[in-house]
Image (cartoon, rainbow, N blue to C red):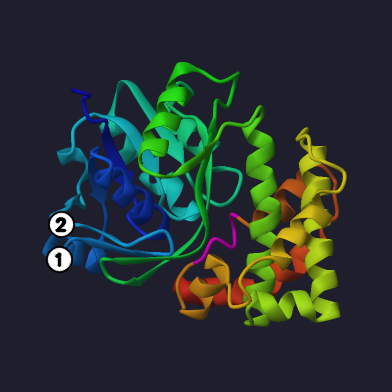
Amino acid sequence: MEVAVRIAVFGAGGVGGYFGARLVNAGQDVTFIARGMHLEAIRRDGLRVSSIKGDCVVRPAHVTDDPTTVGTVDVVLVSVKAWQVPEIAPEVRTLLGPKTVVVPLQNGVEAADQLAAVLGREPVVGGLCKIMTAVRAPGHIEHSGLKPTVVCGELYGTATRRIERLSGMFQQAGVAVEVPADIHTEIWKKFLLIAPWGGMGAVTRVSVELIRKVPETRDMLADAMREVACVAVAHGVELESDIATRTLTFIDRLPPEATASMQRDLDAGRPSELEAQNGAVVRFGNARGIQTPVNAFIYRVLRPLELTARGTAC
């Protein structure tokens, strides 16, 4: 009989809650690390997933707010918000054994390096996910779009046995897996999608349908994508020359009501990933002397909302 993989899902929101629930249903030993009302709802009622791929419920769910009680695990899925990664990295260390694999699934391009700075290079692989999810209520995850996909790969070399094992684990749970030749390229390709879209959505406060239909906002979105591409290439990332055009085509296929998580967070008055998205475009651009005027505009306009959400506005 095959032994279940011990998995800690650090952050049981839309991403971690969805993938963690699918892994539980596939027979894996999953502990969710959550906080606040979400934690209490999962403890009381289990974790519910409403999905275009089929609903599921994890009841009872193994959930805690104290990682030190979990012990060592085989895999850690880090699915907190990008700005929380440096905060929780020391707590992730308590979950590590000699062969534990840590998989960051954040938006942005810095999470793997931030984890490696605390945990060392060996446990950390590169990762991202493709899915549209949200926490609709405490203990309730809604999956509304895209084929659930995890992309993973070694940060410092070619595919390895542990990447193969990760792939098999997700595939058994009904999750599509991609193992690219260069995980850094894939991380930046998603960044090129999510930072401009999330920033434009937060500034305009409309769904993707209007952003892509109105000529002025469509042009701004495309310009913001081209800026990210220029910054990526300046940092040695290999991208196709038409990547911005291809990404805009992908935007055209999204459900008309779709919004990005950064827009939803700022609309709700919650801290967002602004620093890790448009702020990071500006920072990485400045580091190579690349001008990023559209992303800089987005960042500057949204900065007061971000400070207000964090309670640090002047």
The span picked out in magenta is 272-276
The crowding category of the residue bearing disc 2, from other C-alpha atoms within 10 Å (few below 14, some 14 to 19, many at least 20), is: some
Q: CA distance from mark 1 to mark 2?
A: 7 Å
Name the residue rendered at 59%, 76% in the picture.
Answer: 304
In the rendered structure, does residue 58 fall within the stretch colored magenta? Answer: no
Please give left or right for residue 225 compared with residue 4 in the image: right
Please determine whether, in this image, residue 277 is positioned above or below residue 74.
below
Return the residue at label 1: 45
Where is residue 258 drawn, in percent x and y?
Answer: 58, 72
Q: Amino acid at mark 2?
A: Arg
Where is residue 312 drawn, in percent x and y?
Answer: 48, 72
Q: Nearer the viewer, residue 275 or 19?
A: 19
Where is residue 244 drawn, in percent x and y?
Answer: 81, 54
The answer to which quarter of the image holds residue 72 is top left
* Badge 1 element: helix
* Badge 2 element: loop
Q: Amino acid at mark 1?
A: Asp
Please give left or right for residue 128 compared with residue 186 in the image: left
Name the residue rendered at 68%, 81% in the picture.
Answer: 204
